[in-house]
Amino acid sequence: MNLPVKFIEKYQQLLGEEATAFLTSLQTLKVQKGFRLNPLKPNFKQVKIDLSQPLAYVATGYLGAVSGRSLEHQTGYLYSQEPSAMYVAEVAAVQPGERILDLCAAPGGKSTQLAGKLQGQGLLVANEIDAKRARVLAENLERTGATNVQILNEQPAKLAKKFKEFFDKVLVDAPCSGEGMFRKDPSAITYWSPGYPRECANRQREILKSAWQMLKPGGQLIYSTCTFAPEEDEQIVAWLLAEYPTLKLLPLKKYSGMDSGRPEFADGRAELTKTIRLFPHHFQGEGHFIAKFQDMRPQSTQKPKKSKKRFNQFFRVLNPSERGYWQEFCQLQFGRQLFEFADLRVLNDKLYYVKPHWPDLTGLRVVRPGLELGVFKKKRFEPAYGFALSLDPTLCQRVIELSSDQWNQYVQGHPLQLSSIAKKNGWYLLTCQQKAFSFGKVTNQVLKNYFPKGLRLRYGQR
Ligand code: SAM
């Protein structure tokens, strides 16, 4: 890898004697792979993957490489993520029931981890400004099976107008100069110039201004980057502390190999050592920076306003025939009604699970307003892929367990001839190794293919 001369000179000056070890690690050491298991899945540790290298600092994290084409990945049982990146959502210390915003969320490494920590209680709003990346974010979040996530594709400033002082915790995993990713993705070097970190820092300040507006009094802000640049790390933290006097830095637990932030890289304030720097010559992972702030304004004692009217403006309620199709589906599949009608809404003929107290999304670019349960077509209901991924097969009455070969055929888009046991016509949850991966429809012993077309192309031909 050819590091830019100006980059080398900059870090020789900043790191002094340590620069050689740092620069050598970027050029010689291999990228350390890792993955996380998903605690939202039933029996989530039952995976055919080597779990012999657990990470001390992430409850569900492991060292090791996993294939994006594996059954475990495709059913959302695991997420491939480099080890440093996993510590960000961990320090967020999310509690079930909190309202969390992941403001720069795609492709979803941190969001999928945050969703796991919420355990289905509270709300995660995952936002991504880039439309294409927001779709990838939605795919990754959908696979987790999380039921309490809204996915948006908005500019932070626009969100700030809507979600004033709304979130208990806001994560800004900022777009940055990406120096920490040079080793993992050498193409990141081509964007780099000596002035690039400063450009990124300007953008980070704008994003953080919006983040601040959305933070509840008494809430917590987590800021992270994947760069070594002081302009985007310690200097942004110092700027935040000066700009918002009620923000206080929280000390972060440092595990073996984790460095403290460096006061001398900013305005010299000693408390910058509470932040974390992950350097590849000290830590088994790529470059990262993490800071966590506590807002000291008193928490509001007022209950948030509930407005049914605003909720209904964005969605509509089910009409009587839609209620009938849904009830019939539930009776066959679960032997009971799965949700209260108060938590079900329709948007563009799609049925969603959404809580009435979730925020009004009118006027925003919405990728997923809640868990997509399915779509109402002419005189029928078709269950959605995301719904299948959220289900525990042991709670379902109509399940077809497929072999690995059949699963492989199905995710490539092929229908399957069912020979062994005669199945009644209708919808079935499909599983492989007891892991739910789709719904399929049986018609006269043929299992018709309902695996999403966009995913077939990428998942086929392993
Ligand atoms: N948190 C993600 C994860 O763990 O997978 C990675 C986020 S990445 C470091 C930063 C994201 O910020 C990118 O997806 C990028 O598209 C987005 N972004 C770029 N410009 C932005 C802006 N002005 N406001 C908000 N997000 C922006």
Image: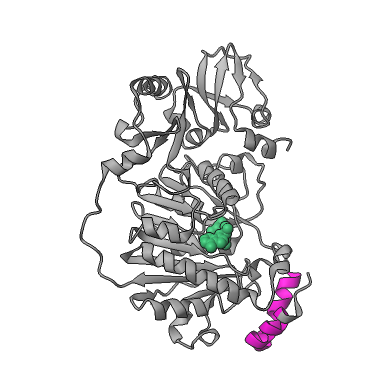
Give the camera-side residue of 234 and 287: 234
Report whether 20 appears left or right of 203: right
Q: Residue at x 48, y 88 (%)?
A: 268
Q: Which residues are magenta?
A: 7-29
Residue 17 image point, x, y percent? 68, 88
Give the camera-side residue of 328 and 286: 328
Report whether 312 appears left or right of 211: left
Q: How is the image coloured?
A: one colour
Q: Residue at x 25, y 69 (%)?
A: 298
Chief secondary structure of the magenta portion: helix
Q: Quadrant of the C terminus?
A: top right
Residue 445 image point, x, y percent? 60, 13
Magenta includes 20?
Answer: yes
> Looking at the image, is 165 positioned above or below residue 264?
above
Report whether 331 appears left or right of 368: left
Examine the rendering and report whether any part of residue 256 can be seen: no
Examine the rendering and report whether any part of residue 212 can be seen: yes
Q: Quadrant of the N terminus?
A: bottom right
Q: Which residue is situated farthest in the front direction here?
A: 363
Residue 319 image point, x, y percent? 35, 24
Magenta includes 364?
Answer: no
Q: Residue at x 40, y 71 (%)?
A: 293
Instruction: Classify the position of ligand 1 by quadrant: top left, top right, bottom left or bottom right.
Output: bottom right
> Looking at the image, is 416 positioned above or below residue 291?
above
Residue 418 image point, x, y percent? 62, 16
